[in-house]
Image (cartoon, rainbow, N blue to C red):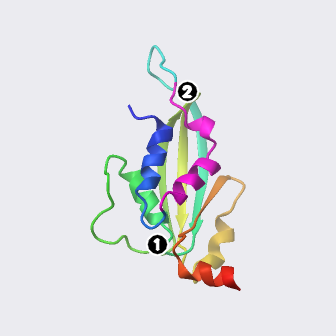
Amino acid sequence: AMNPRRWVAWLCSRLPRTYGLAGFVVCCVLPCRCLESPKESKDDSLKDLGKRQVLLLGLDGAGKSAFLWLCENPITATLPAEQLPATQGAKRLTRKVPIARGQLELDLCEVGGAESLRCFWPHYVTREVKRIIFFVDCRDSRLQEIADA
């Protein structure tokens, strides 16, 4: 079985146009100690550690949908040949993740990054959200324009 920490690194390395930046974000935002391999137990059952909501934000085209798609299809090595459609609104995915102390249920919520949708981002930031992952496409020319200003 693949170590969950290595799995996240492998998954993030497959994101388009991010060259590992998303992997860095995920490993910094999600505590690495929680992504260690669970210790072997005699009955192979993992203690349920509850549910954590994670909000995925970023400008359009930053790789949020690709990350969510790869989380949904963990055995697939590449993204589908057709381009993933832009998120209109929000998408959710729930996954159980084994960690050192048991099993954690991650509720991943991606909110579209189009300019018309950004005004809705604050509505998704609630007390239940435990982590916010902000995706950045380092090759996005809009970011360079902001940096130059």
Q: Identify residue for label 1.
A: 87
Range covered by the magenta-colored residues = 19-38
Name which residue lies at 46% across and 72% down: 87
In this rendering, is residue 37 above or below 62?
Answer: above
Queried whether the magenta region covers residue 36, the answer comes back as: yes
> Earlier along the polypeptide chain: callout 1 or callout 2?
2
Kindly identify the amino acid type of the residue bearing the numbered disc 2.
Lys
Specify the quadrant that holds the C terminus.
bottom right
Circle 2: element type: loop
Most distant residue in the front direction: 148
Q: Position of residue 91 (x, y in %)?
A: 48, 64
Name which residue lies at 40% across and 35% down: 2
Specify the quadrant that holds the N terminus.
top left
Name which residue lies at 55% across and 33% down: 36
Residue in the foreground of this view, choosing between 97 and 76: 76
Quadrant assignment, res 33: top right
Q: Position of residue 34 (x, y in %)?
A: 60, 36
Dots 1 and 2: beta carbons under 8 Å?
no
In this rendering, is residue 119 above or below 55?
Answer: below
Most distant residue in the left direction: 81
In the rendered structure, find residue 47 and report the number of the disc placed on it.
2
Q: Position of residue 109 (x, y in %)?
A: 54, 59
Q: Where is residue 13 in the image (x, y as percent from the top left)?
A: 44, 54
CA–CA distance in space, label 1 to label 2: 34 Å
Name which residue lies at 58% across and 82% down: 142
10 Å crowding of disc 1: few (<14), some (14-19), many (20+): some
Circle 1: element type: loop
